Amino acid sequence: MPAGSPHTRLIDKLAGGLVPVRPLGSPLRRVLGWLLVVAFPGAGLAAVADLRGALSRHAADPDLVLAAIGSIATAVTAAAAAILATLPDRDPRWAILPAPSLALWIGASVSGAEHGAPISLSEACACVGFILGLGVPFALLLAAILKGGYALHPSLSGGLAGLAAASAAASILGLFHPFAMALNDLALHALAVALLSGAGAGFGRRLLGASA
């Protein structure tokens, strides 16, 4: 092809504007990175929490232990599922990865709450505020991590990110929860988790706009 032909000039022009693509880190590395950042406020808050009292409450209530395991596992698996959902070569069925741990969390929480005395509305609302206050920045951080991929279903990825963030915040809340689980408290916890998950799904396309 002649050096001065239009095709050559077009190819040179296109090639001159190329930007090197930065390869994505492995899903495991990105999940661990998010968990590490999430752990910082958790560790800071744990330093001022009554850990002895929290351990005593958990030791006296097996349902509370199972609920804590379920919430932590849901945070990890939902974050992993959200990241895998942004990789087009991965099986979309990875989206159900958090289902078993979520079922454990819900089942143990309901079982424990059936025997708890109702708490005041102000106390329950404080729990909601705590979950949302930590969950929103956790979700935004995970959304920033997800933007490096290509989300074929951004609403699904966003919903999973919201679930992961809410689960992480609820897990940290367990360090400060000074009373036994109650049904009215559990209902508002579920509302906070649903709000974050729903917001993530609703704003998934906007938050993951670069990858949609």
Image: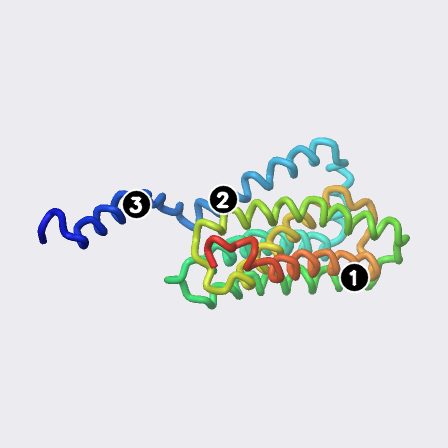
Percent position of residue 149, x then y? 43, 53
Percent position of residue 160, x then y? 57, 59
**Which residue is drawn at the image coordinates 43% and 57% (left, top)?**
150
Numbered disc in front, either 3 or 2: 3
The reply, left or right, for residue 135 in relation to residue 61 is left
Q: Amino acid at mark 1?
A: Ala
**Which residue is drawn at the image coordinates 60% and 39% (left, top)?**
39
Q: Residue furthest right?
A: 120
Q: Do tag 3 and tag 2 residues touch (Cβ < 8 Å)?
A: no
Give the quadrant of residue 116: bottom right
Give the quadrant of residue 185: bottom right
Q: Earlier in the sequence, mark 3 or mark 1?
A: 3
**Which residue is drawn at the image coordinates 52% and 54% (left, top)?**
208
Residue bearing mark 3: 18
The reply, left or right, for residue 122 in relation to residue 209 is right
User: Helix, strand, or loop for circle 1?
Assistant: helix
Q: How many angstroms separate mark 3 from mark 1 (CA)?
A: 52 Å
Toward the viewer: 163 or 16? 16
Toward the viewer: 32 or 62? 32
User: Helix, strand, or loop for circle 2?
Assistant: helix
**Which residue is drawn at the image coordinates 64% and 44% (left, top)?**
137
Residue bearing mark 1: 187
Q: Amino acid at mark 2?
A: Leu
For label 3, count other residues whose C-alpha is less than 10 Å away and answer few (under 14), some (14-19) or many (20+). few
Q: Earlier in the sequence, mark 3 or mark 2?
A: 3
Q: Residue furthest bottom?
A: 93
Residue bearing mark 2: 32
Q: Amino acid at mark 3?
A: Leu
Q: Earlier in the sequence, mark 2 or mark 1?
A: 2
Toward the viewer: 210 or 107? 210
